[in-house]
Image (cartoon, helix red, strand yellow):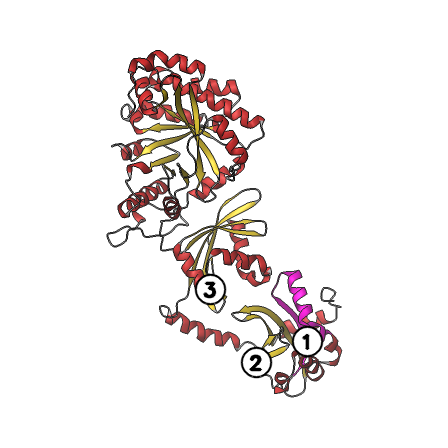
Amino acid sequence: MQHIDEQYIIRNFDTALKKGYIKAYYQPVIRTLTEQICSVEALARWQDPEMGLLSPYLFITVLEKNRLIHKLDLMILENICYTYNEMREKGLPLHPFSINLSRLDFNEMDMLKAISDILEKYNVPSTAIHIEITESVMLDNTAYFRRIFDSFHEAGFAIFMDDFGSGYSSLNVLKDYSFDVLKIDMRFLSDIGMRSKKILSSVVNMAKAIGIHTLAEGVETREQILFLRTIGCEMLQGYYYSKPMSSEMYIDYLSASNITVEKRSESDYWDTIGKVNFLSPDPFNEISSDNFPIDDTSVLRESPTALALIEIDGKKVKFQYANRAYLDEINKLGYNNTREMEEAIESMPVVYFQNINEQIEMSLKTGKLIKKDHFANAVYFTYSTKCIAKTDSKYMLAASIKTFDPARTANREQMFEKYSRILIDTYDHITIIDHENNRIITRLYSKIGFTNEYLTMPLDKARVLFAQNEVIESERERFIKFTDISFVKKHIEKTENPILQQPFHIKNQDGKFIIRDIRIIRTTVEDGERFLFVIQSMSPSAQKKALEALEETFDDFN
């Protein structure tokens, strides 16, 4: 352990400031969901020409004891301003810097004025500076420091509570003061074992419940990162990503690193997303910490809700987060992971997801929680969506999925089967078509006495013969075009509607031609794309409108 005479530090302090032996070193803060730099913490480092690198804990303690710490903190702020302006001149993306303030700073001067004067001198906005405070600053005189913090907030500064968990009065401080970010000190946990996971989960859950963002410092392993991401900790800082760097090294790091910097225009977007409590049984709404279930039988219980965060940027869809429950549910739909779902969405026409797309559009438009039932890959499920944040170009959707489990919802399945039959009975005819293999798979249902001959021949011949035998002569040419699957697919892609619909006069069993509604519906099942050829009777008023339509030329159809 380093031993330096206290007087040596006091005698050499002013010289060290003037000659630049003491400098700000920078350690990036990473947004957990994107792994982009969202801010950076400035840390004091003293590289002495005689004694080498001095321990910060050593010289900071001496400076506080001798009431000199305010000089150090203001010098670090000036270093930040130099670096900020150099980044601006080089065209590098800008981000906030955080600075640590001592309890004694507030006793020596009007710290808000001193900081504001320096920022004005260097033309740096207050929103570019975050103030980090340890709980020891606030142990006495609560009303006094609350007024100070309120003044900092009013001036545009964000305030972080530093080293949460390392002291004795953290909960009292949280009760008495308003913080923007809670910095969780990973070092007070000796490992990432079961007890540590419970503690960290509880802290993050509590912070979310009272509206405070969370940042874990001292992160050193990928295991820690994955766990912190799972429980919804929003930001990370530690040696896993980077050691503290000098200004020169940091600027080179930004210029060359594969890690990108978060756009300032998106900071509020990600902060809003960060408010979602991944551990809540009701993550779509504000909750209290009482709702978080941890007991002796579960080390960490994720939200029972299958939760995902889905970013929509134009037509591009990206899953930013999905918990275990969500992955389990989409597995029942035939997807092993969210990447497979992304690829399916990118590769399939929008009409395959028409109902879900309509639900998402409503969520984006209204901002309300929307719940709808869907059917895909032979699975019925309820999908819940809510737009939780947006920028000029993209949206973040919170989504939940719940499949219908026949073993647990037998009654609902029986009711569904019962009323599905009733719905089917409203149709006159349903045929399943496999256009890829040019065949009719089966006649699913029919009240009309069509010959079985159509089922035994290729699809292209069957539809021509059907037109000749079953469709009134004046409409046969239109029917043949209407049932050309190549035409159907183009029309569906153009309209983004999986249903093509036209009225036709179809021969009844008594030989009369009755106007009926014919639809060709595009759908997908486990073994590929299929089309349904559906005929439905029409009410007298609907028949009248259809006859009027038949007098027109169907310009949109041709």
Does the image show residue 380?
yes
Residues at badges 3 and 1 in contact (C-beta under 8 Å)? no
> What is the three-letter code of the residue carrying label 3?
Leu
Q: Residues within 10 Å of mark 1 (few under 14, many from 20)?
A: many
Magenta highlight range? 478-507
Q: Which residue is mark 2?
A: 442
Q: Quadrant of residue 2?
A: top left
Q: Is residue 465 above or below residue 266?
A: below
**Inter-mark Cα distance, 3 to 1:** 37 Å
Q: Is residue 137 above or below residue 182?
A: above
Pick the front one: 385 or 279: 279
Q: Residues within 10 Å of mark 2 (few under 14, many from 20)?
A: few
In the rendered structure, find residue 6 and report the number of the disc placed on it.
Answer: none
In the rendered structure, find residue 504 and report the number of the disc placed on it.
Answer: 1
**Inter-mark Cα distance, 3 to 2:** 25 Å
Q: Seen in the image, is 391 located left or right of residue 16?
A: right
Task: Give x and y (percent) for residue 178.
Answer: 36, 32
